[in-house]
Each structure stands twice: as C-alpha cells, then as structure tokens.
Image: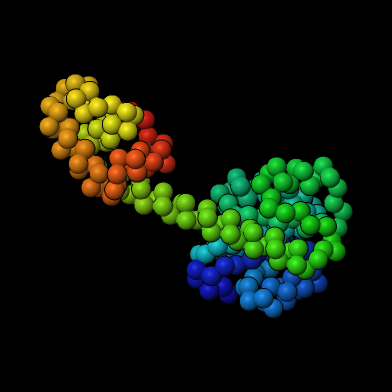
Amino acid sequence: MTSAGAATVFIIDDDAGVRAAIEGLLKSVGLQSESFASPQEFLKNWRSNGPSCLVLDVRLPGVSGLDVQQHLSEAGVHVPVIFLTGHGDIPMSVKAMKSGAVEFLTKPFREQDLLDAIQQALDLDRVARKREEDLAGLRKRYDLLTAREREVMGLVVSGMLNKQVASDLGTSEITVKIHRGQVMRKMQARSFAELVKMAEKLELSPGN
C-alpha cells in the first residue's frame, strides 16, 4: 500500500524475479513501488495520489508493451513510461520514444540507468501535475466571472482598448473599466500581462 502524496513507481512485468529485483532496488533508495504481473491487473488496481511513473516490460504474454502504452493513454491514464526489454530493436525503441516513453532500457540494464530514468520520469510527472493543478485553479476562478466579465476579459486580452470594448459591447467605457477591474480581482491577476497568460492557458478567444 502506498502513502498518499508520495512518489510511486509502478512495475508491470510477467517475470516475478524481475519485479522483485526492481522493487528491492527501489526500496534501497527509499522509493515506494507496486508491481503487477499483467496490464489488466495494473489497470484494475492502479491508484495514484502523487507523482508516479511506470516501468513496463515491452513484451508481455499476448500483448505488446507499446499497445499497453497506447491503451493507458486512451483510458486517460497519463503516466510517464520507462520500457524494459530483452529483445529490443531500434524501430521498437523509436516508436516507444515517439509515443512519449521516457526511456527504453535493454535487459540486462545498469541499475543506475534505471534509477536515473525513474527520477527523470517522476520529475516530469511532478511538473505535469503542477500544471494540471494550476489550470484547475484558473478554471475555478474563471467560472466565478459573470457572462459580461468573460466577454470583457476575452476582448481586452485580444488587445482591444477599453473604448473599443465599450463600442463592441454597446456600453460605456467606465462600465468596461469596472468589469475589467472585477476580472483582475477575481482572476487574481497582478498585472495585465499575467491576465493575458492566464487567458492563453485557458485557451480563450474573443467571445468566449
């Protein structure tokens, strides 16, 4: 059982010896892990409340690790993947990397190479989680805006002056200034440049 919020390395390999060896290695450096003999077992039990990555054997009974990677993506499981294989070839490695794999290691691999790849994968997941957390916060603040405040925000971040926004919306410039001030306050934007960046992250366009 993993601790909430702690980094976790998930392992999928049909070889019990390999799973045990990797778990022992990770334990020796203070990393917690969970291992599974099949992708089905992983998907059934996968839970992650903190940074995580997946160490995945590229050749599993009846299924390719590359297929598992694609299936995980389609299932909404976005976790950095490190592939292990005893039968690696260049085309397979290229395909894995193009599909977003962090690393592709051929058995027998150096323990330090695996640990380095895992650290890189966990760092990537931390960044992705922080980005998602920040975006969720932005969306929550944007949802607090009134329909007119959203209109004003969309127009001002597109580069329109207050008087142009007023003309476009059929209202007064002072009213636009008031709405703009409310937008800045509710979005917690410290500057107009920051508001523009927020709009870019929310993928807003005039009229949104």
Q: Residue 15 versus residue 81: which sits nearer the camera?
A: 81
- Residue 142 position in % (x across, y down): 30, 44
Residue 125, picture quadrant: bottom right
Q: Is residue 104 visible?
A: yes
Query: In which quadrant will I find the C terminus?
Result: top left
Residue 146, picture quadrant: top left
**According to the image, what is the colour scheme of the structure?**
rainbow
Q: How many marks?
A: 0
Q: Residue at x 28, y 26 (%)?
A: 160
Q: Residue at x 28, y 35 (%)?
A: 153
Q: Residue 208 versus residue 39: which sits nearer the camera?
A: 208
- Residue 50 position in % (x across, y down): 52, 64
Residue 20, picture quadrant: bottom right
- Residue 77 position in % (x across, y down): 58, 52
Q: Residue at x 56, y 49 (%)?
A: 76
Position of residue 112 relative to residue 84, above or below, is below
Q: Residue 195 versus residue 118: which sits nearer the camera?
A: 195
- Residue 88 position in % (x across, y down): 85, 51
